[in-house]
């Protein structure tokens, strides 16, 4: 899952990016409203984490612009303001959720999982396809009850495929879900991750759709 973090507090943003990446999200960061709107035009994320107190335009105005362009994109507001009026203004402008600073990363991750469930990408924290089970809350994968050891990228790739079981995932979409902006990506990186997963899950679990991408059967 790809997240766009819009936050002008760079130390806070750096910590959030690391925490989200450790939780197997891909997180891209911008610090202004202008950069955020440009990023949304270029590469639509799955979820936006939007700070209200931006230096060029307030986050509520950005949220209203987002809603004019995209009524479905989930947006969670981040703000130091914790009054009822501020919460109402944010929710009335189209926010899906509201998180007051300071907050614990565990609370943010719980809110993100709740948004994922509303999106329908994960009906619960556990996804099972055939003999393979993935627990998104614990970040574990098991086959016939036996837990596997996966790298972070392998886990992220498998999660994306299992969330979309039965549907073809094109190469570009999978790469966007695995790598953040500026991260160097080898031309065969996706194939290498698929190869390693097949060695652990069996050759038949992940299907290659030649010239298009990959899928797992539902």
Image (cartoon, rainbow, N blue to C red):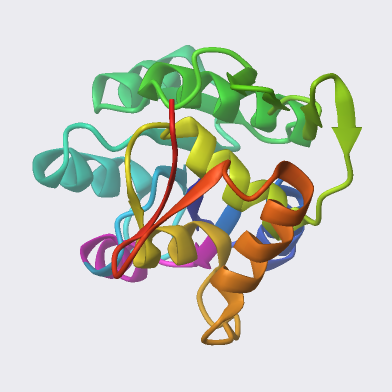
Image mark count? 0
Residue at 10%, 41% (x, y): give it: 68
> Could you say where residue 154 lies in the image, as x and y percent from the top left?
70, 55
Q: Is residue 74 left or right of residue 198?
A: left
Which residue is more in the foreground, 9 or 124? Answer: 124
Answer whether residue 104 is visible to the viewer in this image. no
Q: Quadrant of residue 145?
A: top right
Kindly report the secondary structure that dominates the magenta region of the rendered protein.
helix
- Above or below, 151 against 86 in this view is below
> Could you say where residue 96 lies in the image, as x and y percent from the top left?
38, 24
Residue at 36%, 67% (x, y): give it: 172
Q: Quadrant of residue 109?
A: top right
Residue at 60%, 22% (x, y): give it: 130
> Could you say where residue 12 lies in the image, as x and y percent from the top left?
71, 56
Answer whether residue 162 is visible to the viewer in this image. yes
Magenta-drawn stretch contains 29: yes
Magenta part of the chain: 28-41
- Above or below, 92 against 40 in this view is above
Which residue is more in the foreground, 152 or 60? Answer: 152
Q: Is residue 10 left or right of residue 84?
A: right
Magenta-drawn stretch contains 131: no
If the image is split into quadrants, where does the C terminus sit? top left
> Could you say where residue 156 lies in the image, as x and y percent from the top left?
63, 49
């Amino acid at each position: 899952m790809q997240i766009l973090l819009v936050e002008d507090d760079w130390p806070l943003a750096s910590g959030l990016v690391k925490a989200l990446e450790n939780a197997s999200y891909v997180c891209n960061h911008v610090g202004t409203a202008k950069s955020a709107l440009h990023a949304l035009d270029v590469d639509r994320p799955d979820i936006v984490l939007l700070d209200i107190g931006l230096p060029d335009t307030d986050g509520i105005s950005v949220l209203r612009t987002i809603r004019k362009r995209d009524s479905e994109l989930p947006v969670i507001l981040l703000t130091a303001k914790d009054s009822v009026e501020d919460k109402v203004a944010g929710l009335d402008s189209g926010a899906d959720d509201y998180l007051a600073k300071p907050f614990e990363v565990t609370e943010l991750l719980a809110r993100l999982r709740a948004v994922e469930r509303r999106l329908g990408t994960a009906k619960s924290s556990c996804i099972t396809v055939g003999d393979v089970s993935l627990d998104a809350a614990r970040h574990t994968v098991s086959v016939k009850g036996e837990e596997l050891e996966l790298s972070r990228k392998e886990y992220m790739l498998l999660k994306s495929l299992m969330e979309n079981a039965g549907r073809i995932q094109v190469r570009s979409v999978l790469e966007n879900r695995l790598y953040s902006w500026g991260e160097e990506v080898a031309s065969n990186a996706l194939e290498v991750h698929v190869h390693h997963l097949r060695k652990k899950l069996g050759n038949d679990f992940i299907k290659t759709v030649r010239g298009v991408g990959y899928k797992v059967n539902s």
